[in-house]
Image: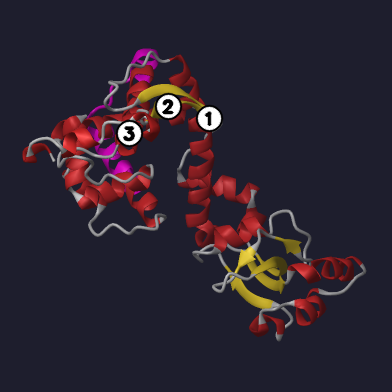
């Protein structure tokens, strides 16, 4: 653990990719070879999860990955790190392969083996969908409308106008009429609220699709509150005014992302169960094992309350070496 934390805190690119897997700041702590307690606990948690899954799969299924499976797991781990880093607000400069190569040998071997056993376990779960072209195509055909190109209109409404806006909509006012009359976004309001079209290849597709999920066609639905750059708050209403069916080829990347999320949910449920039954001991210097609202995990060690630290002047009055 000491060697792993030191490697992460001294290699900015490795720290960037590790942080993308589970957000934490791996900057040096009180000493040059230490990290913040929260970061140590976060990494300890990831290692405990990997060990628990590895031990379960090895014991239950007698599974030991061969060279080909380890090579595939290495590629999978690099792809996962790349994907998570792409979704992070902090962009990593190097590649995930370079970050993996920067790990100490034992750490790298453990991470690849943990990835291999995790992939094996996921295949054994009834709730997961294999990430093969045949399975992905079948899933797409069963959820084809989830991958339509969506053309949307918006209305940015001041809080005071929301009641009259909703009343006008309830009495039959069209999307275009409502946007022109009530929307505070001048560009889209002039076009009857028309804002743009989003295909599965758009970086905003997932959020737009989520905003209009379950909404009636050509009718506004309220989304989370919107605050502009000046701090003014509005109610944001979005409506789908046109849907265009896409082929699997166009939707493939979004289908893959959706299935990864679904598989991750199923795997998380199993992971919590495994951790709840695992016998875990964590060195107190790296964290404390306890129960969270979502299951057991490693917490950062607690520190004394400032009110209880009454001898702060002791160090400052000592020899210069310790000041």
Task: Categorize mark 3 by other alpha carbons within 10 Å: few (<14), some (14-19), many (20+).
Answer: many
Check the picture and name the quadrant holding the N terminus: top left
Q: Which residue is the site of mark 1?
A: 294
Which span is picked out in magenta? 57-80
SS for tag 1?
loop
Callout 1–callout 2 Cβ contact below 8 Å: yes
SS for tag 2?
strand
SS for tag 3?
helix
In the rendered structure, find residue 297 and report the number of the disc placed on it. Answer: 2
Residue depicted at x 49% and y 32%: 268
Q: Nearer the viewer, mark 1 or mark 3?
A: 1
Percent x, y of residue 207? 58, 59
Q: Is residue 275 visible?
A: yes
First in residue order: circle 1 vs circle 3: 3
Percent x, y of residue 82? 33, 52
Query: Does 91 sit above or below residue 153?
Result: above
Q: Which residue is at the far right?
A: 171
């Amino acid at each position: 653990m000491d060697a792993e934390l030191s490697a992460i805190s001294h290699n900015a690119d490795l720290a960037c990719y590790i942080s993308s897997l589970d957000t934490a700041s791996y900057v040096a702590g009180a000493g040059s070879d230490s990290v913040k307690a929260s970061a140590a606990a976060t990494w300890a948690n990831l290692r405990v999860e990997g060990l628990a899954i590895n031990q379960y799969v090895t014991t239950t299924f007698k599974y030991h990955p061969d060279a080909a499976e380890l090579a595939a797991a290495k590629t999978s781990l690099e792809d996962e790190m790349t994907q998570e880093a792409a979704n992070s607000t902090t962009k990593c400069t190097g590649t995930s392969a370079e970050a993996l190569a920067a790990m100490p040998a034992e750490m790298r071997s453990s991470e690849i083996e943990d990835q291999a056993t995790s992939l094996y376990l996921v295949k054994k779960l009834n709730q997961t969908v294999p990430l093969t072209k045949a399975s992905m195509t079948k899933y797409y055909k069963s959820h084809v409308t989830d991958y339509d190109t969506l053309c949307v209109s918006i209305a940015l409404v001041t809080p005071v106008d929301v009641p009259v806006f909703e009343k006008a909509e309830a009495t039959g006012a069209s999307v275009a009429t409502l946007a022109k009359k009530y929307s505070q976004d001048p560009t889209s309001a002039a076009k009857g609220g028309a804002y743009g079209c989003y295909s599965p290849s758009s970086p905003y597709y997932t959020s737009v699709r989520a905003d209009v999920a379950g909404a009636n066609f050509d009718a506004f639905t309220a989304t989370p509150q919107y605050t502009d750059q000046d701090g003014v708050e509005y109610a944001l209403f979005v409506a789908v005014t046109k849907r265009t069916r896409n082929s699997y080829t166009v939707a493939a990347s979004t289908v893959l992302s959706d299935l990864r999320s679904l598989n991750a949910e199923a795997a998380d449920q199993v992971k919590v169960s495994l951790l709840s039954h695992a016998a875990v001991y964590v060195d107190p210097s790296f964290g404390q094992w306890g129960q969270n609202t979502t299951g057991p995990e490693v917490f950062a060690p607690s520190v004394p309350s400032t009110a209880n630290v009454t001898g702060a002047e002791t160090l400052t009055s000592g020899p210069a070496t310790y000041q």
